[in-house]
Amino acid sequence: MENTLTRPATSTVRPNRLVELLLADRHPLTLSIALHLVPGALVVAAYLFLAEPFVKAIDYPVFLAWAIALVIVLVPLMFGLLWLGRVRTGRYTLRTVAHYRDRPISRGKIIALIAVLIVWMTVVSLALVPLDDFMFGNFFTWVPFEGAGGSATTYIDGYAHSQLVVTMLICLPLTGFTLPLIEEYYFRGFLLPRIAHLRWGAPVLNTVLFSVYHFWAPWTVLSKIVFLFPAVWLVWRKHDIRISIGMHPGTCLLMATIGTIAIILGVTP
């Protein structure tokens, strides 16, 4: 009888099927839709069951609750991308997971392009506030979230100045930069390249699904599609994620900083 103890060791462990699907160069359409939308559903769940009760208990604006809910979901999502990088390379990295990071556009052109897109996103998003108001008033008044409404200030209305200042200072580095940055690495760096085989349909689908992913503000879907699409299309066309990183976190940081300063100085309406 053969001595099994002397047999050479062989690996019979098969790679995890889900990990294989996630790291594949192409994502099936159903998987991609799920990966775009599930994080949004998790944000809403984190808000309802964890963040909102906590923030109400300390009597702070619900804007802080949404920031906490986004942190609960997006920070682990970022670590998940890094873990996928470790599966592929043996170390925690985004290099083989998030694509469009080879910087094909020159520094001067990328700076100019980002500046134009920041102006575009800022002006167009503000110009489309009446559209958000219309959509909310006619189709989404049933949304149960406290502070829901077309105006960006509804989430902070009715609180003391000191509470608003603390809330904005806490949220500034989060909703103003870090969380939008994670969204860009996930939605544009990880998901968009894996549906690039859809050709022009890739930036369209990515923009629409990213807009819908904001389940906490469904009345803003149309306006988000309008002001986000140019950057998403350019990322897909030029293979340079710096375009959307510059526009999205850049604009959020600009507007959040202005809003925070206005609240500190007491010049808000």
Image (cartoon, rainbow, N blue to C red):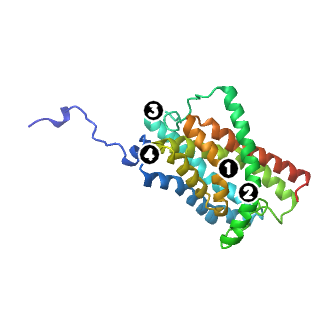
Name the residue tied to disc 2: 128
Measured in 3D between alpha carbons, the distance from the residue under mark 3 to the one under mark 4, in whole angstroms, is 15 Å
In which image quadrant can residue 45 be found?
bottom right
Amino acid type at circle 2 is Leu
How far across and down, in percent of the image, does residue 232 sit? 60, 44
Measured in 3D between alpha carbons, the distance from the residue under mark 4 to the one under mark 2, in whole angstroms, is 36 Å
Check contact, mark 2 vs mark 1: CB within 8 A: yes
Question: Which of pointers 3 and 4 lies earlier in the amino acid sequence?
Answer: 4
Question: Which of pointers 4 and 2 lies earlier in the amino acid sequence?
Answer: 4
Question: Which of pointers 2 and 1 lies earlier in the amino acid sequence?
Answer: 2
In which image quadrant can residue 116 be found?
top right
Q: Secondary structure at mark 2?
A: loop
The quadrant in which the N terminus is found is top left
Label drawn at residue 22: 4
Measured in 3D between alpha carbons, the distance from the residue under mark 1 to the one under mark 3, in whole angstroms, is 36 Å
Q: Is residue 247 above or below residue 51?
A: above
Crowd around label 2: few <14 · some 14–19 · many ≥20 (10 Å): some
Label drawn at residue 89: 3
Amino acid type at circle 1 is Phe
Name the residue tied to disc 1: 227
Res 148 seen here = no
Question: Which of labels 2 and 3 is toward the front?
Answer: 2
Q: Secondary structure at mark 3?
A: helix
Amino acid type at circle 4 is Leu
